[in-house]
Amino acid sequence: MKVAVFSTKAYDRQFLEAANSSKQHELVFFEPRLDRDTAILASGFPAVCPFVHDQVDASTLKILAKNGTRLVSLRCAGFNNVDLNAAAELGIRVSRVPAYSPYGVAEHAVGLILSLNRKIHHAYNRVREGNFSLNRLLGFNLHGRTVGIVGTGKIGLILGQIMKGFGCNLLAYDVYQNPGIEAMGGKYVELPELFAKSDIISLHCPLTPETHHLINENAIAQMKPGVMLINTSRGSLIDTQAVIEGLKSGQIGYLGVDVYEQESELFFEDLSGEIIKDDTFQRLTTFPNVLITGHQAFFTEEALHNIAETTLSNITDFEQGRDCPYEICPQPQPGHNKVLVS
Ligand code: NAD
């Protein structure tokens, strides 16, 4: 099938072409993001392949449908950037890659925890400049500390396993309990207790209306003074202004984030040498106890391989008229194991 791949980076091309050697789709790579202005590039392509920051809204979908597109094969898990109702009305089907690197994301969260705790980002720069002083590099043992995990699905559970290995106590909160947490000695509690008792809080729930700004002024006030807050899930789980106030007062002792509320204006692009106009983001970068990575938690060889394989399999399913297990529908479809949105 002829597929227009949008937001292409060199690594997307490398892994998609490798996975395609056994599938023989006709992949055409475009660097621009997919939106209403670039949708015309997909004229004559029955399938498009967008990523997380592409804008697959109703106006984009109308242009795609008019020019022959029948499948949106997302090469990511999240689908908040696709208007599923508009797609269904236009006869465009949508698929995604629901899981590709739970170990990669959990391990990245651990990387943020260790770097912040032992101030490895500062030590790296100091040693390169011949500064071997230990002043202000004091850390703490993870052993015996309490880690609060919000969202205990695939990634949250793996984070729990890793932190258990460090000798941490585990507290957890989720709307559905995962038996794996209690099996390793963790304890489910309500959010206020998790906030009050955790030395490290790590977010692993999706962004929904219920979880938007889950970490706000009120939540931060309930936390232990000097708490470490880690977010590798979605930027809008955190009210960034409230977190900045928490950092200024010392209530938040460490912040490690791989995601940011307004990240679509910044992340995945090389903006070095340019003026960053987002003052909130710039303020965050000034704190010595804040570590930001640009949505790279998923970015492992294994994940890119899995993303490419599943994306192209989804396209093959569609081409051959097979049921695709990773199709996303706006309405319940009896008899199908499909993801539903309300
Ligand atoms: P998952 O679906 O396996 O687990 C999510 C868990 O969150 C589920 O157990 C669910 O019950 C729980 N949850 C839902 N609503 C909740 C609420 N209101 N409060 C508490 N818990 C709630 O998903 P996953 O694969 O573990 O991924 C978790 C998140 O990680 C994703 O939603 C995504 O935003 C993020 N993610 C980030 C990257 C990255 O590169 N930074 C990559 C992949 C996924």
Image (cartoon, rainbow, N blue to C red):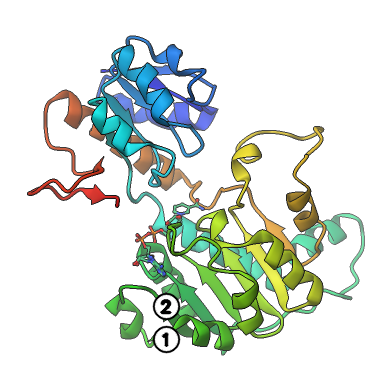
> In the rendered image, is residue 193 in sight?
yes
Decide: marks 1, 2 in contact (CB < 8 A)? yes
Could you tell me which quadrant the N terminus lies in? Answer: top left
- Mark 1: secondary structure: loop
- Mark 2: secondary structure: strand
- Name the residue located 80 percent from the left edge and 71 percent from the top edge: 248
Q: Earlier in the sequence, mark 1 or mark 2?
A: 2
List x then y, in percent, for residue 306: 35, 43
Q: Alpha-carbon neighbours of circle 1 within 10 Å: few (<14), some, or many (≥20)?
A: some
Left/right placement of residue 212 relative to residue 66 reads: right
Figure check: 224 above or below 214: below
The answer to which quarter of the image holds residue 325 is top left
On residue 189, the disc is 1
What residue type is disc 1 on?
Val
What residue type is disc 2 on?
Tyr
> In the rendered image, is residue 167 in sight?
no
State whether label 2 is within 8 Å of ligand 1.
Answer: yes
Figure check: 310 above or below 282: above
List x then y, in percent, for residue 177: 31, 77
Q: Which residue is mark 2?
A: 173
List x then y, in percent, for residue 18: 37, 28
> What is the total number of numbered labels drawn onto the structure image?
2
Left/right placement of residue 339 relative to residue 221 reads: left
Nearest the eye: 297 or 64: 64
Q: Quadrant of ligand 1?
A: bottom left
Nearest the eye: 213 or 281: 213
Separation of residues labelled 1 and 2 (CA atoms):
6 Å
List x then y, in percent, for residue 276: 78, 39
- Name the residue located 28 percent from the left edge and 17 percent from the top edge: 46
Left/right placement of residue 340 relative to residue 109 reads: left
